[in-house]
Image (cartoon, rainbow, N blue to C red):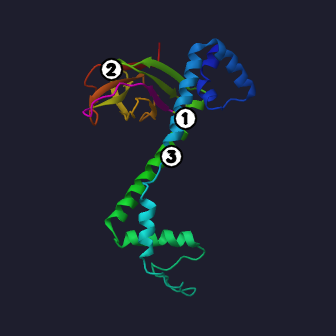
Amino acid sequence: MTAADLHTLTGAYALDALDGAEAGAFERHMAECGVCAQEVRELRETAARLALGVALVPPPAMRERVMAAVAGVRQLPPPAPEGDVVPLRGRRRGRGRLSYLAAAACLVIAVGAGGWAVNAQREAERDRARLESVRQETAMLVDLMSAPDTTMRTAPVSGGGEATVVTSRGLNRAAFLYRDLPELPDSQVYQLWYDEDGSMKSAGLVDAPEGGSGAMLLAGGPRGTDGVGVTVEPAGGSAEPSGAPVMLVPFKG
């Protein structure tokens, strides 16, 4: 394995995806390569933040409100004989007490027992959708960082902070890992762009959390592109860059 090959293993090593021989070779390399050592630390910090990002805590009062509403719901009728049509309020066979409570809570929401119940259901659905989105994005980030052709290019951001563009031509996927991005006013947002032979194509908006550090997948893929740029745009983004990039990472040279 050449030194050039070892430089590409930072993502896999940070995620414990290397076997014993590869891990040993990379650790010996990392002891002499400060760039790789720093990249591993940053990737592990990012992986930890992504893991924390999937923990969604429901509102503290949700359980009490649901249980209070369930107590006021009329008891369900006995199950209908085999072959008959079961009313909507009928209990499904094979369900336990928890299923009964869940069904009763759903019934409360369905009949409009209270506006709060509808809002709670909508909030729960949004939380589930966000959780699933985070899980999918985390899995794709792990696949990207573990791909054999993954490359990582780090550059400073004008005004402060730095970012790493992670790409895999084989997966046709790219990610943007950023740290200490300067906070923007509500009227502005960071926007990512692919450079396609001098033409800039939007690759998504950066939803930077408090602290200015995080990771995200770029919209679209890096095949056929020459690099990735970041600009500061009005809230909601722009159809094309409105100013000079605050960061530009070429894929060649």
Give the answer, above or below, for where 74 lies relative to 193: below
Question: Label 2, label 3: how many angstroms apart (C-alpha)?
Answer: 34 Å
Q: Residue 252 placed where, x, y %?
A: 47, 16
Give the answer, above or below, for where 68 lies relative to 30: below
Q: Which residue lies under the disc numbered 1?
A: 48
Mark 2 vs mark 1, foreground winner is 1
Mark 2 vs mark 3, foreground winner is 3
Q: Residue 58 placed where, x, y %?
A: 45, 54
Give the magenta part as a residue range.
Answer: 172-187
Q: Is residue 41 magenta?
A: no
Q: Residue at x 41, y 70 (%)?
A: 69
Callout 3 amino acid: Ala
Callout 2 amino acid: Pro
Q: Which residue lies under the disc numbered 2?
A: 245
Q: Is residue 106 left or right of residue 238?
A: right
Q: Which residue lies under the disc numbered 3?
A: 55
Question: Label 2, label 1: how many angstroms apart (C-alpha)?
Answer: 29 Å
Badge 2 marks a residue whose secondary structure is loop
Residue 113 seen by the camera: yes
Callout 1 amino acid: Ala
- For the residue pair 138 and 5, the one nearer the viewer reads as 138
Q: Tell me the quadrant of the picture where the N terminus can be found.
A: top right
Q: Residue at x 43, y 80 (%)?
A: 74
First in sequence: mark 3 vs mark 1: 1
Q: Are marks 2 and 1 in contact (CB under 8 Å)?
A: no
Query: How many neighbours does mark 3 have within 10 angstroms: few (below 14), some (14-19), or many (20 or more)?
Result: few
Quarter-of-image position of residue 234? top left
Q: How many marks?
A: 3
